[in-house]
Structure formats: structure tokens, C-alpha cells
Amino acid sequence: MSIYYDDGRVTLHHGDALENDAWRLEGDVLVTDPPYGMAYVSNSSRYGSTAPIAGDDTVDARDKALRLWGTRPALVFGTWRATRPAATRQILVWDKGNSPGMGDLKLPWGPSWEEVYVLGEGFQGKRGGAVIRIKTIPAGSKDRPNHPTPKPIPLMETLIEKCPPGVIVDPFAGSGSTLLAAVNLGRRAIGVELDERYCELIAARLSARTETFIFEEA
């Protein structure tokens, strides 16, 4: 595993988080959207319809990462189609609002929501409902990162705002939304991404954010 990007606030590693688990020693709160048994393949050629997300045919990657993480606080995305983590204390629902989502295309309904599992202790903030209503990023939008399953930054900010203090870590960094949300909230963040294409994407998003931040400060 090697450092792909580091600006002093965010460190991104390129490599397999399940083979090199140094990330678990550096972080305080796990916030991640892992492969979780969807066997997801995008229908869009933009993302490569023949290139499924690595490890997404089972929940093995998710469960191994959680075993490495232990009992510390974590927010982990998932689906009702797969077995939930055994230590789940609460299930949050992300209501996407404007998207039928993935699912059985033979049915006239699409699952326009995803689950987020709350594990560990120390979460804080004003008590509210477990449904978070934030629209997903529409396909074809200029604001949508070149990734099959990007999470909206406002969604990740909403989740991280109620996390305990400390370094946010995401061992399946994907499009980098967790890392961007963390730094937007003034948090130190560490990410690991297996696919170099997405490391490049994350680095570009972080660099653009840093350049905008420097300009605004000036």
C-alpha cells in the first residue's frame, strides 16, 4: 500500500485495505460504503458495464474490515438484501428522493433508499429521526463524479456531523465523498482505495477542493 495523495488534512492510500490494515491504527471513526453483496454492475458504459465493483459479490470484504476495526464507532452502508453486521445498534435510512435506485427491473418500484448501519458508541448531536432525506446525484449530471455509486457530499456531512471526535477513516474510499465531507467539516481523514482509477478521481476532487479553499481564504 502506498500514499497516493496527502495534503496534510487528507491522506489517500492506494492498495488493498484488507491486506494492509495500517489504516485501522490511524483512524478513530469508520465511515464507509464497502462492497456489500450487491454484485453491482453499472448499465452505463461511462463506468464500464463489464467491470463490477471488486469484491461486491459477497459481504466478505465488509465483514473482514469490521473485524479489523473492532468495536469502535462506525457508520457502514448496506442493503436489506444482505445480512446486516451482527453488532448493528441502529439502522439509518438514506432516502434518495429522486431515484428509483437499483433492484429488480421487472417490478414497477425501485428501492429509492439505502441502509446505513450504526456500530459502536460515542455518537453525538441533537436526537432526530433515522431517515435522512438527501437527493442522490442524477446520472448525467455535471456534478456527478465518474464513479458508479458516488455518495452525495451533503449526505456524508450529515452523517459525519454526529460522529465522535477524531480522525475519519474510509478503507473503501470509492469516489472520495467521505474524505471530502470530513475535510469540509474540519476533520482529518484517511482513505484507502484499491482501484487506481478512483484514486486518481479522489485526488482530483480533493485538489480542486483545496484550490477553491485557498482562493476563498486569500
Image: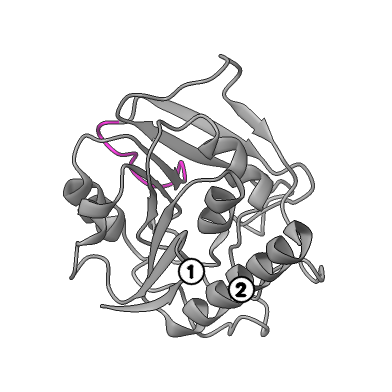
Q: Residue drawn 58% across and 46% down? A: 156
Q: Is residue 7 magenta?
A: no
- Assign a secondary structure to mark 1: loop
Residue 141 point in image, percent of width and height: 81, 68
Please provide the residue range marked out in magenta.
Answer: 79-87
Does the residue at mark 1 contact the one at mark 2 (Cβ under 8 Å)?
A: yes
Q: Is residue 84 magenta?
A: yes
Is residue 55 found left or right of 157 in the rendered image? Answer: left
Q: Mark 1 against mark 2, which lies toward the viewer?
A: 1
Confirm whether residue 138 shows in the render: no
Between 109 and 122, the one lying in front of the other is 122
Q: Residue furthest top?
A: 127
Question: In which quadrant will I find the C terminus?
Answer: bottom right
Residue 161 point in image, percent of width and height: 55, 34
Circle 1 residue:
7
Residue 34 point in image, percent of width and height: 40, 57
Between 56 and 107, the one lying in front of the other is 56
Is residue 170 found left or right of 49 in the rendered image? Answer: left
Residue 111 point in image, percent of width and height: 64, 45
Q: Residue drawn 68% across and 83% down? A: 46
Q: Say if 176 sits above or below 54 in the image.
A: above
Circle 2 residue:
207
